[in-house]
Image (spheres, grey):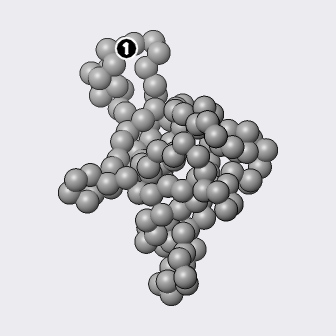
């Protein structure tokens, strides 16, 4: 089975905040470039998609990307570079940890599956 070319260039990130720069900061950074973005996103990355989904359920498994020091790998990207939201399913193992709730599972779980069957557009993008 060949690598899925549709997932190349896509990566899941957890958006932490959306912001814009002050007019002065924007001018200092972009020197009034006409194509400069006006809004940005601070996000924390997950791993890149593997060449193939997991064979049992056809979901791609992703994990938190971390630096060598164990910190979450983060970036600031233009808001316009975001493609869409993603439905993540936590990887539970034998049992769900009792401390995981819908409010904190994204912070406590390290490994997720990307649900490619959420809607038609996700399916076309991921599968």
Q: Please, which residue is most extreme toward the right here?
A: 120
**Residue in view at x 29 percent, y 23 percent:** 29
**Residue in view at x 60 percent, y 56 percent:** 54
Q: Position of residue 31 (x, y in %)?
A: 32, 14
**Residue in view at x 26 percent, y 52 percent:** 67
- Compared to 55, does 26 lie above or below? above
Mark 1: few, some, or many residues within 10 Å (few <14, many ≥20)?
Answer: few
Q: Nearer the viewer, residue 106 or 113?
A: 113
Whether residue 18 is visible here, answered yes or no, is no
- Compared to 86, does 91 lie above or below? below
Answer with left or right where residue 29 lies relative to residue 98.
left
- Compared to 3, does 29 lie above or below? above
Q: Please, which residue is most extreme toward the front here?
A: 1
Kindly state the secondary structure of the residue where label 1 is placed: loop
Answer with left or right where residue 115 lies relative to residue 109.
right
- Compared to 32, does 12 lie above or below? below
Whether residue 117 is visible here, answered yes or no, is yes
Residue 123: image quadrant is top right
Residue at image mark 1: 32
Q: Position of residue 61 (x, y in %)?
A: 54, 56
Residue 71: image quadrant is bottom left
Answer with left or right where residue 105 lies relative to residue 57.
left
Instruction: Report the quarter where the C terminus lies.
Output: top right
Q: Nearer the viewer, residue 58 or 77?
A: 58
Q: Please, which residue is most extreme toward the left here?
A: 69
**Residue in view at x 53 percent, y 62 percent:** 112
């Amino acid at each position: 089975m060949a690598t899925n070319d549709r997932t190349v260039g896509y990566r899941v990130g957890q958006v932490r905040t959306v912001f814009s720069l002050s007019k002065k900061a924007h001018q200092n950074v972009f020197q009034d470039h006409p194509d400069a973005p006006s809004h940005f996103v601070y996000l924390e990355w997950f791993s890149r998609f593997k060449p193939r989904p997991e064979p049992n359920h056809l979901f791609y498994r992703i994990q938190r990307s971390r630096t060598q020091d164990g910190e979450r790998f983060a970036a600031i990207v233009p808001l316009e570079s975001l493609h869409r939201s993603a439905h993540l399913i936590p990887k539970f193992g034998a049992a769900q940890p009792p401390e995981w709730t819908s409010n904190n599972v994204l912070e406590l779980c390290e490994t997720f599956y990307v649900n490619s069957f959420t809607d038609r557009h996700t399916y076309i993008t991921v599968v």
